Image (spheres, grey):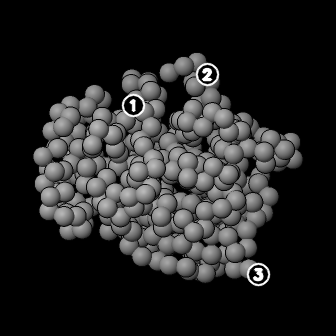
Amino acid sequence: MTDSFRATLHSMVEEMKAAPEAMQPSKFWQDLNRRHAERIASAGIANFKRTLAKDYFTWMRVLPWDPQIRFLVGHLPLGASIRAALGVISPFKHRHIPLPEGFALNFLTRLVWQYARQEFPKEIAALSEPSVGNPPAIRIGGGLVSQDLANSILEYKSIESVVTGTVCELGGGYGRTAFVIASLHPTVRYIMVDIPPALGVAQEYLCQLFPDRKHFRFRPFDNFETVQEEFEASALAFLLPHQLALLPDSTVDLFINISSLHEMRLDQIECYLSEIYRLVRPEGHFYLKAWKVSKIPFEGIVIRESDYPLERWERVYRRPPKIQSSFFETLLRKPKT
């Protein structure tokens, strides 16, 4: 870990102390952040796609009867499933990843990639998995492939028609979705919002991938006017969750939340949804993807799809997403008035 990255994380952690209770990390994320800090200390930020990513959206703990595998085997030609099975031990060992998790990772990644290529060959051909973060060396046809890139393309296709202007993502992890959208829509401004260390990793990752774009790097501020000019000139911006409250109303054209609201308490969910509604412009959109039912570790509560207060929004669609059948995805539009 470089001194610069260490200083950035320290600044983020200190600034998080100013956040209201509803925007402090849940007990689940406090525990996860502790483990993430240990992994960064032992394996370094250079290996985050092998260490941190499995707690974001890279699945390494799956069994043959997992719903994702059942979906993929049912929607792919038999030959594709056989090729994925034959690739279970290729590569045999991923550094920083336990052997059983590595085999599961190899199998599921090959299935997910082949499915995404079957459904959206143009986008799969246009993008390749960045080497930054030392992703597991899984290759198809000589090219580096990943679950994260394939899943992000599938999610992107669910919102492609409304990607415009300013996009804001809450809980975006290291920036897998941001990479896809920023690559395919280079004129979009992308605001990444997360807690440390995820925000620090995302900032390092995306600024390295898009060095020629203007960056509004994380910093503490108390008044939007003091940073407005630099913020509005940026293509990539990085904020802690409570800093959303400093942004003006109707700042965002599309707000994204994938697999993070369901890891919070109900009061936190209500707080964030209120803030999201304020920030999205009239006739702008909100894309939500979450577990249908989620048990929150350490909190002793269960979050169900019906618990999300979304009544103020107009529903464009609600459906099971491709692959993750235990999730739901919905695209919502804010009324004009």
**Amino acid type, label 3:** Thr
| Mark 2 Cα-neighbour bin, 10 Å: few <14, some 14–19, many ≥20 | few
Give the number of the mark in front: 2 or 1: 1
Q: Distance between the residues labelled 1 and 3?
A: 47 Å
**Amino acid type, label 1:** Asn
**Amino acid type, label 2:** Ser
Do the residues bearing badges 3 and 2 touch, measured as CB atoms within 8 Å? no
Q: Where is residue 272 in the image (x, y as percent from the top left)?
A: 61, 61
Q: How far apart are marks 3 and 2 (CA)?
A: 46 Å
Q: Is mark 3 on a helix, strand or loop?
A: loop
Q: What element carries label 1?
A: loop
Say which of 41 and 268 sits in front: 41
Q: In which image quadrant can residue 42 be found?
A: top left
Q: Where is residue 74 in the image (x, y as percent from the top left)?
A: 20, 68
Q: Which mark is residue 4?
A: 2
| First reached walking from the N terminus: tag 2 or tag 1 | 2
Question: Does 44 appear above or below 322?
Answer: above
Question: In the picture provided, is 85 more to the left or to the right than 315?
Answer: left
Q: Residue at x 23, y 44 (%)?
A: 106
Q: Which residue is drawn at 73% across and 44% down?
A: 234
Q: In which image quadrant can residue 122 be found?
A: bottom left
| First reached walking from the N terminus: tag 1 or tag 3 | 1
Q: Residue 134 carries which label?
A: 1
In the current view of this chain or complex, which residue is farthest to the right? Answer: 225
Residue that numbered label 3 is attached to? 337
Q: In which image quadrant can residue 251 be found?
A: bottom right
User: If the image is split into quadrants, where does the C terminus sit?
Assistant: bottom right
Tell me if residue 48 can be seen: no
Say which of 5 and 275 sits in front: 5
Say which of 37 and 297 sits in front: 37
Q: Residue 69 carries which label?
A: none
